[in-house]
Image: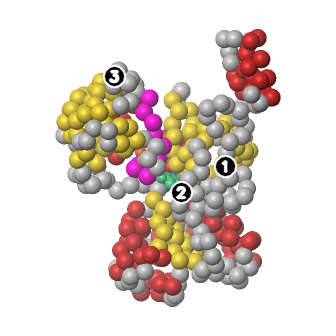
């Protein structure tokens, strides 16, 4: 037994029924035996509706790599909600996220986060990462999709004098552009960094049906390792274009949201959450097993809620479920079901 665990076990004699960890937590709010946490150290307004929230993580956090994301948990009306956010700070520094208000959790983070608040954290993850060796890079981003790329740029430029990076960033107007002044400074200070702004309010979107637009913006795009992050349409169009030009191996894509089928719906049925001893009747709509469980009061594991992080996997005990992205039906007992993108296709028993 180590000195710390011996001290904890000795202390427990005097502190029962509260556990020693509970007392440690009173002294250090970042200390928790079970859940990684961070304390907010700054909240910096970016453009309208967006803020950067920096935090000091507690013990157990592993440093992030440029381009990775983490799941962040916040309590809203007494319920802990988790969402994924790219870490916009450079690798090697304390993490920061840059959040744009679009829905319930992001609005809460943007409007209510204060210095000193405690957020819940999951370890950094993701393979949207810089190449291991030097290569000319093209970053193609739109809106809040610039956040993982910002971490890459902030990491790479100070470390490599020979970096060769073109960033093409789309935003509606100059005022809507995240990190605008920092990007201008980096462009002025680094010969190998060139930023091109595309303001869709006046210039329209980049046309990916032919290479003409891209060739004007970055003539050697085919020979660059390319990172793309932004709305689904941009990602789909770029993927198609890189494929048509046989350079898809050079493309890395980071998705913030998932495309569901246009007629995404299950067929409904009774859903039994076995471990929780709860049941609910589902209609034949696009309501997911995650939402049905939450509505029934089941503590459902989840993260991004959009089929990306796989934090919501639950074993299927019996019945059929439909994947709302592909229409695939899963019915094998023991199959791990992504509840955030699956709906019942008849009666279902889940092991949760
Ligand atoms: C790997 C990953 C990294 C992410 N990084 C960031 C980030 O750096 N900054 C950030 O602001 N968000 C990021 N997101 C999105 C974030 O996880 C949430 O989905 C977003 O904040 C909306 O959550 P919400 O509860 O506010 O809205 P909800 O009520 O859950 O959803 C509202 C709607 O907004 C859509 N939506 C999700 N993200 C966006 C977006 N960026 N722009 C427009 N609509 C969107 C959803 O599809 C949904 O239809 C990331 C997501 C993933 C999976
Ligand atoms: S919650 Fe992220 S994949 Fe389901």
For label 2, being within 8 Å of ligand 1 is answered yes
Sequence order check, earlier mark of 3 and 2? 2
Residue 303 vs 183, above or below: the answer is: above
Q: For label 2, count other residues whose C-alpha is less than 10 Å away and answer few (under 14), some (14-19) or many (20+).
A: some
Q: What residue sits right under mark 3 in the picture?
A: 278
Query: Where does residue 184 sit, x and y in percent of width and height?
Result: 68, 73
Place residue 32 in its image quadrant: top right
Task: Please name the residue shown 35% across and 42% down the image.
Answer: 336
Q: What residue sits right under mark 1 in the picture?
A: 62
Query: Where does residue 193 sit, x and y in percent of width and height?
Result: 66, 79
Residue 113 vs 208, above or below: the answer is: above
Q: Secondary structure at mark 3?
A: strand
Is 67 covered by the magenta stretch?
no
Q: Which quarter of the image is occupied by the N terminus? A: top right
Sequence order check, earlier mark of 1 and 3? 1
Q: What residue sits right under mark 2 in the picture?
A: 126
Place residue 268 in its image quadrant: top left
Give the Cα distance between marks 3 and 2.
Answer: 34 Å
Give the Cα distance between marks 1 and 3.
Answer: 37 Å
Give the Cα distance between marks 1 and 2.
Answer: 13 Å
Which range of residues does the magenta coloring cover?
A: 299-308
Task: Please name the residue shown 29% across and 33% down the image.
Answer: 317
Q: Secondary structure at mark 1?
A: loop
Q: Secondary structure at mark 2?
A: loop
Q: Main secondary structure of the magenta part?
A: loop
Sequence order check, earlier mark of 1 and 2? 1
Is 300 covered by the magenta stretch?
yes
Q: Is residue 351 left or right of residue 256?
A: left
Query: Where does residue 321 sit, x and y in percent of width and height?
Result: 25, 41
Task: Please name the residue shown 71% across and 40% down the image.
Answer: 58
Q: For label 3, count other residues whose C-alpha is less than 10 Å away and answer few (under 14), some (14-19) or many (20+).
A: some
């Amino acid at each position: 037994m180590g000195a710390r665990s011996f001290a904890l076990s000795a202390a427990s004699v005097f502190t029962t029924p509260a556990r020693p960890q509970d007392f440690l937590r009173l002294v250090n709010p970042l200390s928790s035996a079970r859940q990684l946490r961070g304390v907010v150290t700054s909240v910096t307004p970016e453009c309208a509706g967006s803020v950067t929230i920096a935090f000091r993580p507690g013990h157990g956090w592993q440093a992030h790599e440029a381009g990775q994301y983490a799941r962040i948990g916040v309590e809203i009306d007494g319920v802990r909600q988790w969402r994924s956010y790219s870490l916009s700070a450079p690798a090697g520094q304390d993490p920061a996220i840059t959040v744009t208000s679009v829905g319930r959790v992001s609005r809460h983070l943007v409007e209510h986060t204060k210095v000193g608040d405690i957020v819940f954290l999951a370890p950094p993850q993701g393979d949207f990462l810089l190449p291991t060796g030097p290569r000319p890079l093209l970053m193609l981003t739109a809106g809040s999709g610039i956040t993982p790329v910002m971490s890459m740029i902030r990491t790479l430029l100070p470390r490599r004098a020979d970096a060769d990076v073109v960033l093409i960033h789309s935003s509606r107007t100059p005022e809507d552009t995240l990190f605008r002044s920092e990007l201008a400074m980096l462009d002025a200070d680094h010969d190998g960094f060139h930023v091109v702004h595309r303001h869709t309010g006046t210039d329209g979107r980049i046309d990916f049906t032919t290479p003409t637009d891209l060739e004007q913006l970055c003539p050697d795009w085919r020979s660059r390792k390319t990172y793309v992050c932004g709305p689904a349409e941009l990602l789909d169009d770029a993927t198609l274009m890189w494929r048509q030009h046989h350079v898809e191996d050079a493309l890395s894509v980071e998705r913030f949201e998932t495309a569901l089928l246009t007629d995404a719906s299950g067929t409904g049925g009774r859903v039994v959450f076995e471990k929780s001893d709860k049941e609910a009747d589902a209609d034949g709509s696009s309501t997911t097993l995650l939402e049905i469980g939450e509505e029934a009061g089941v503590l459902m594991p989840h993260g991004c809620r959009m089929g990306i992080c796989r934090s919501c996997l639950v074993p299927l005990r019996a019945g059929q479920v439909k994947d709302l992205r592909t229409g695939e039906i899963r019915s094998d007992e023991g199959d791990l079901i992504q509840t955030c993108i699956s709906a019942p296709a008849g009666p279902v028993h889940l092991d949760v």
